[in-house]
């Protein structure tokens, strides 16, 4: 007989459960965690340990018997055909070896073949396909029932809306199947989102996982679409069973079915090969375009998987090895401000240097004044910071107020040029409006040269600082007039590097129109908008001459973006800049689009809702290929509004204005598809 539990254990268990419940609510329901994952995991491990020692104290509502979070109101809940279980965690290689020992013991095998794959850090969802067509997307929820988020799943572009019958046949899969995987946001998309939120004064997201999770669980699927989410598939089921003899075959089949699945998984003959894989990726994960928080290890043979079976919460045939969290606490010694290329002042925390995942961190962006207020942060406070990939770390929360804490105030004058700072009451941004402010000049040159813009390798901040300080470059067009001896005279610039840089600058003239538009750094014009603008206008001059109504004809360009573009090009200095660029030989024209017919010539289309057979972008592309135009908003001039499932307000507007409404079928008919 097990000995009776002492009162102190009962009390500890109660306290742990209460804390865990609270933190689960913060994490899953509010998408706003207060503590690090590692701290949460530690509490959960301790509770599991106590419950294992005193099984009579396990209750059906203990956080240990539950898999995930409570569904949010507003979605219908759906029962999973087969529970979406969690995975047990291993926090050390020894724990992995111990798990391997148990697997071998239970299966009676001497050595096990494993598949090691990335543990994607996002939100898991299940996608059901009927007759090869995506019929339902459901979040994991509590593992047994999840939220039905089909329109949102459809808004994620890496999720196929249908799978070709020919491919299904080739893969030997019936047309009804289920795919499970993780919805994620790339580091780049996450950074872009927060930069945009910074500018418009919206909510700043703490990490890519939370913003992805939030975007899947919103009632408005246009928000999901705008967040640019990705989906990585890792599990395939037919009638609740794995349809192949090996898990590796499922991963291969998923790729063939045109799901996005990582190529970085590996077959490992035994646990030591798994440990080597984990070590390898710990060093390399920083360079991945998305976040992984560990490695998932699965027994490859499905027969052995079935033999091993499941505990109440997790499969015995799989485990998650978790990398140490890249979160730390440190003190904010000061808050300084940086001036961006649009003149916006960004507050930056100067931190007591601290090691986070092997890197010394001494700065952290605070985004804007609202964020500082939201955090309740003052100079001298102790904060929890997180480093996600190569992103500058950010402050998650204040963990302890400093004894002599001091509130931060935005300066009244620009720290770079001394001009008065402008701040419109009610807006978040504080701006230096001096067009000649060297900080703005510097930032706009760095943006212009950036990897996603004109991609001028070797034009880093040390060089740009000198070019601006010496007066050699006043605007980006001046880059094209630089001479070798001017460059060679700069610090840290050898003759060879001067030559290389000039070659890079020369080569940048051949960049696409989309890159050039993005490189100009027009407010609200990100990479994607630049791409869409380049597809619509044939040159920079044409874009510069466009009126707001014409700009709004470009997909995804609304009044705010259109106004910003018009404002940019109405500025004489910017007009001058375009002339200068052209003179310097920077004059890309749009790539010619394939024109298939003029069937839709002069007709303008608006799309709303999710289409079944193609994405809205693909449908828009078809319209353009046949001579028509696509617009983002419905007006009297709109000829057709094509309506998919769950249409937005554009549908109402179309009915109100009496615009012809088409279903996807009607649209296909019109095109003769
Ligand atoms: S397999 C029964 N594979 O991690 C199989 N899960 O901590 C269960 N996850 O619930 C899932 N990457 O949301 C699997 N490559 C991967 C994964 C993965 C991330 C997530 C998934 C799971 C959670 C468990």
Image (tube, rainbow, N blue to C red):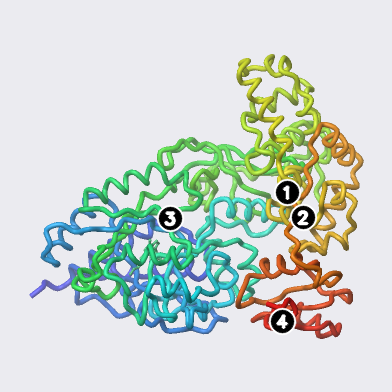
> What is the CA distance from the residue labelled 2 to the residue labelled 4?
28 Å
Q: Are marks 1 and 4 in contact (CB under 8 Å)?
A: no
Q: What SS does tag 1 mark?
A: helix
Residue picked out by circle 3: 36
Mark 2 touching mark 3, by CB under 8 A?
no
Which quadrant of the view contains residue 595? bottom right
* Mark before the other along the chain sequence, 1 or 3: 3
Within 10 Å of disc 3 (Cα), the crowding (few <14, some 14-19, many 20+) is some
Question: Does 313 sit above or below residue 453?
Answer: below
**In front here: 580 or 567?**
580
- The Cα atoms of the two marked residues, 1 and 4, are separated by 33 Å
Label 2 near label 1: C-beta < 8 Å? Answer: yes
Residue on which the image places disc 1: 514
N-terminal of the pair, mark 1 or mark 4, is 1
At horizontal 87% and vertical 50% (from top left) the residue drawn is 542
Q: Is 44 placed left or right of 446 in the picture?
A: left
- Residue at 79% from the left image edge and 62% from the top image edge: 554
Q: Nearer the viewer, mark 1 or mark 4?
A: 4
Mark 1 vs mark 2, CA separation in Å: 7 Å
Camera-nearest label, 2 or 4: 4
Task: Residue 370: give x, y in percent of width and height.
Answer: 67, 54
Which corner quadrant of the image does residue 662 belong to?
Answer: bottom right
Mark 2 lies on a secondary structure that is: helix
């Amino acid at each position: 007989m097990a000995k009776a539990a002492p009162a102190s254990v009962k009390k500890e268990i109660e306290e742990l459960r209460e804390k865990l419940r609270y933190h689960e609510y913060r994490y899953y329901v509010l998408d706003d965690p207060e503590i690090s994952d590692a701290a949460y995991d530690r509490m959960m491990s301790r509770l599991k340990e106590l419950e294992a020692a005193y099984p009579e104290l396990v209750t059906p509502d203990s956080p240990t018997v539950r898999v995930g979070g409570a569904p949010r109101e507003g979605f219908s809940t759906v029962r999973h055909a087969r529970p979406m279980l969690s995975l047990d965690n291993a926090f050390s290689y020894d724990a992995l070896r111990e798990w391997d020992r148990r697997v071998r013991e239970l299966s009676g095998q001497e050595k096990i073949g494993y598949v090691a794959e990335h543990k994607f850090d996002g939100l898991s969802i299940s996608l059901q396909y009927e007759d090869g067509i995506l019929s339902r997307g459901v979040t994991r929820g509590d593992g047994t029932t999840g939220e039905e988020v089909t329109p949102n799943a459809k808004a994620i572009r890496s999720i196929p809306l249908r799978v070709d019958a020919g491919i299904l046949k080739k893969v030997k899969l019936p047309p009804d199947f289920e795919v499970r995987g993780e919805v994620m946001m790339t580091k780049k998309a996450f950074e872009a989102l927060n930069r945009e939120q910074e500018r418009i004064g919206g909510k700043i997201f703490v990490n890519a996982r939370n913003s992805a999770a939030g975007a899947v669980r919103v009632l408005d699927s246009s928000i999901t679409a705008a967040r640019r989410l990705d989906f990585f598939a890792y599990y395939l089921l037919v009638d609740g069973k794995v349809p192949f003899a090996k898990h590796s075959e499922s991963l291969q089949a998923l790729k063939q079915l045109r799901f996005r699945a990582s190529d970085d998984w590996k077959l490992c003959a035994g646990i030591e090969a798994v440990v080597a894989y984990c070590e390898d990726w710990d060093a390399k994960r920083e360079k991945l375009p998305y976040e992984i928080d560990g490695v998932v290890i699965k027994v490859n043979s499905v027969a052995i998987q079935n033999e091993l079976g499941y505990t109440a919460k997790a499969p015995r045939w799989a485990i998650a090895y978790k990398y140490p969290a890249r979160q730390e606490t440190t003190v904010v010694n000061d808050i300084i401000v940086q001036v961006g290329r649009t003149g916006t002042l960004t507050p930056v925390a100067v931190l007591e240097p601290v090691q986070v995942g092997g890197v010394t961190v001494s700065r952290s962006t605070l985004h804007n004044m609202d964020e500082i207020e939201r955090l309740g942060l003052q100079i001298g406070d102790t904060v929890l910071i997180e480093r996600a990939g190569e992103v500058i770390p950010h402050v998650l929360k204040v963990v302890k107020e400093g004894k002599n804490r001091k509130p931060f105030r935005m300066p009244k004058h620009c720290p770079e040029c001394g001009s008065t700072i402008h701040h419109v009451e009610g807006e978040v941004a504080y701006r230096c409006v001096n067009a000649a402010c060297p900080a703005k000049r510097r930032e706009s040159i760095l943006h212009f040269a950036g990897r996603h813009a004109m991609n001028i390798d070797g034009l880093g901040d040390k060089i740009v600082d000198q070019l601006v300080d010496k007066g050699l470059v006043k605007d980006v067009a001046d880059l094209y007039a630089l001479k070798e001896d001017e460059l060679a005279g700069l610090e840290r610039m050898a003759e060879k590097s001067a030559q290389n840089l000039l070659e890079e600058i020369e080569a940048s003239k051949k960049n696409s129109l989309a890159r050039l538009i993005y490189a100009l750094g027009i407010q609200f014009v990100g990479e994607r908008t630049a791409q869409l603008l380049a597809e619509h206008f044939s040159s920079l001059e044409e874009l510069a001459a466009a009126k707001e109504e014409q700009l709004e004809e470009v997909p995804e360009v609304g009044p705010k973006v259109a106004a910003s573009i018009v404002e940019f090009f109405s500025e004489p200095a910017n007009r001058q800049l375009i002339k200068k660029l052209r003179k310097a030989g920077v004059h890309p024209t749009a790539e010619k689009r394939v024109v298939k017919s003029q069937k839709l010539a002069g007709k303008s289309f608006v799309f709303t809702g999710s289409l079944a057979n193609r994405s809205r972008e693909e449908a828009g592309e078809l319209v353009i290929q046949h001579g028509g135009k696509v617009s983002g908003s419905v007006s009297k001039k709109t000829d057709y509004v094509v309506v998919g499932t769950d249409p937005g307000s554009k549908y109402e507007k179309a009915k109100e204005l009496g615009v012809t409404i088409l279903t996807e079928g009607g649209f296909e008919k019109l095109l003769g598809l």
